[in-house]
Image (tube, grey):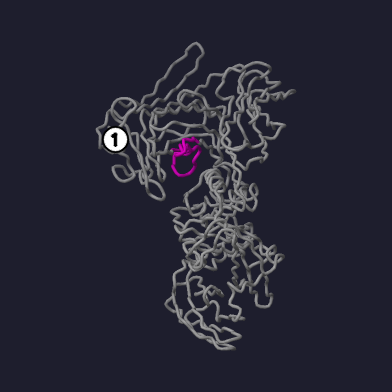
Amino acid sequence: MKKLYSLFLFCFAASLINAQITFYDDFESYSPGNYLGDVSPDWTTWSGATGGSLDVKITDDMASSGKNSIFFSSTAPSGGPVDIVLPFGDKYESGLFTFSLKIYIPENGSAYWNFQGEEAIGQVWCHNAYFLPSGEIQFSNSDNGLALGSTYEKDSWITVDYEINLTENSWKINVNNECIGSFTNGFNAVASANIYPTTGNAFYIDDVTFSHNTNVEEKRLDGALAMSSVPAAGFTGMEQGITGTITNTGSEMVTSAEVVVKFPDGDKNFTFDNLTLAKGDAYEFEIPEMYVIAEGNADIKVELLKLNNETDEEFCNNIFSGQVLGVTPKEGKNIIVEEGTGTWCGFCPRGAVFLEALTKKYGKRFIGIAVHNGDPMVVSNYDGQHGFTGYPGATVMRRSVDTGFGIIEDLELPFLNYISENPLASFSVGASFDESTRRLDFSSEVVAKRLIDGDNRIAIVITEDGVTGTSSGYAQSNYYAGGDRGPMGGYENLPATVPASGMVYDHVARAVPLGYAGDTSSFETELKKDEMRLFNYQYQIPASFNLDNMHIVMMLINSDGTINNGYSISIPDALEGGFTSGNEDLIEEVEEINVFPNPTSDNLNVTIHSNTNLKVNIDVINVLSQKMTSMVKTLINGENTLNIMTNDYPSGQYYIVIRDNDARRVVQFIKE
């Protein structure tokens, strides 16, 4: 049964008109196997094309009421392809809007939907709902922040109700008829619902309703609580502040407010006096005690307990509830987050903002790398290997790929999950630099925590902060301009295209000296627990790169291509530590290697200076660690000349690896 009607109630005594729009669909008027968009005039798809891959089919496998529902699932790396939309008939910016649905998530499932803020879809995601595989719920606002959190049970029908007072900007949510709290939204409007399964999602939807009422009942004493900053996750013992806003949504002047906070060691009350809040006024408060994160998952709750020493008339907009995850990092463990980005990508400022925030919060434990695509900072082939199907995209330790990462917790939670695992080895790095040739020699000591064998590899990424440029390719597209999508690290105050002169890029990947997959010969000889091995490498730093802003990022790669551990050090700090020559890794007999012209187009000359006669293996590898050329050459004492034809090589970075058993030298060149 489906209903869509307008109800006009005339209150002649007050000379008021109360207009209400109501919609309800339980999918019982359709037949199993029907495409919803084909048989319903109210539902459509993201593209508007119904009856195809973007549309969803009616099913009778499961239902909350009657026999029918709609089922969503996706195994595609970027989610979908099903992508349906329920327009609300208008963009509502005032009045009372309600939305309700019932959802069933099987044991191996999860779910996602969002609200669009404009009638033209794809402009503003004003709200996102994530039902995670772990049983956690995340409700976000248009600011891409975690607005409310809760939990749910698998294999049961769950009722989710929204009561959105657009006049007062109070978004209340009930889960199974229990209020979990309310929040204010940076973009305070709704126009449609979008149900789109992301990768791994599996869920049923039934009994979808919405309504809009132009009038909102005014209360005498009512306040709305909205949190600005509240702990969600962090290292054990980390201190975080709690801030929020109390808005007077009632008719009576508010002169005092009492807030209670659930800390790990119990509830604590805080009173704010001498207020003068008329209807619509807001008071920004800060809890005078820091929240100290405890190990494990802890419930957190902030409640507006009283106004003017009285309990106010609306409970649900008084509370914030969520969970705080506390993790103790393992010694020597650091996490690599590779973020796909591009100056052409209007949502990619989000990636830069999130990387910077997490770097500031976690220091050297969080290693962010900006993998540029389609702009002047691209490293050929490197950005194409991570499985990104959209931008921004991110992979954490090359284990999980997230296209979009709408809220910062999408990166922070896997970071905390992986940092609690024991590393296979730890790194330390030192370096020396020849200013005349701009050659960087760097050494890395690897200490095994457990046995490391030939299935593991070392990979390296060189990054640079403070990158600027003058060409149009350095201008950043910015969909956060104007603030309609909420704050985003200041980008909301910048133009839709930030000129190159106004942009500075950090964490920029500049080179991958051993290729994306790493050096497969790194551990041909196994490394036993507590043993140390010294590796020596070279990198020719281009004149346009600023050595003082650069980092060496080491990675230990697992046999399945995921990252086991990472390590980052600035080149100035590495120079302080100094270069250590290791006779097990560095070919002592090879004193110098030069390549020219570099970049090259079709013919590369290589000169190798040796202090003795020596038989070596010479490989040319690309950034994927694929061998382009292999040869065996006997070096003579003195200068040796080698010619490599590169005319058939695709454009990009390449590395010449000269090996004598476990010892090696590596030099980079670029094919134009």
Q: Is residue 628 above or below residue 32?
A: below
Residue at label 1?
Answer: 58
| Image quadrant assignment for residue 56 | top left
Q: Residue at x 40, y 47 (%)?
A: 79
Front residue of 417/506: it is 417
- In the image, residue 133 lies at what x, y percent? 44, 39
* In-image side of 140 versus 465 (left or right): left
Residue 211 location, quadrant? top left
Range of magenta residues: 113-137
487 to 508, vertically: above or below: above
Percent from the top left, x then y, of residue 210? 42, 28
Whether residue 278 is in magenta: the answer is no
- The residue at the point 48 percent across, 75 percent down is 620
Crowdedness near tag 1: few (<14), some (14–19) or many (≥20) residues, C-alpha within 10 Å: some
Name the residue type under label 1.
Answer: Ile
Residue found at x 46% / y 58%? 561
Q: Between residues 178 and 491, which one lies in front from this camera angle?
A: 178
Residue depicted at 65% across the width and 18% down the height: 252
Image: 237 above or below 331: above
Q: Is residue 401 left or right of residue 508?
A: left
Q: Residue furthest top?
A: 13
Tell whether 200 sits left or right of 427.
left
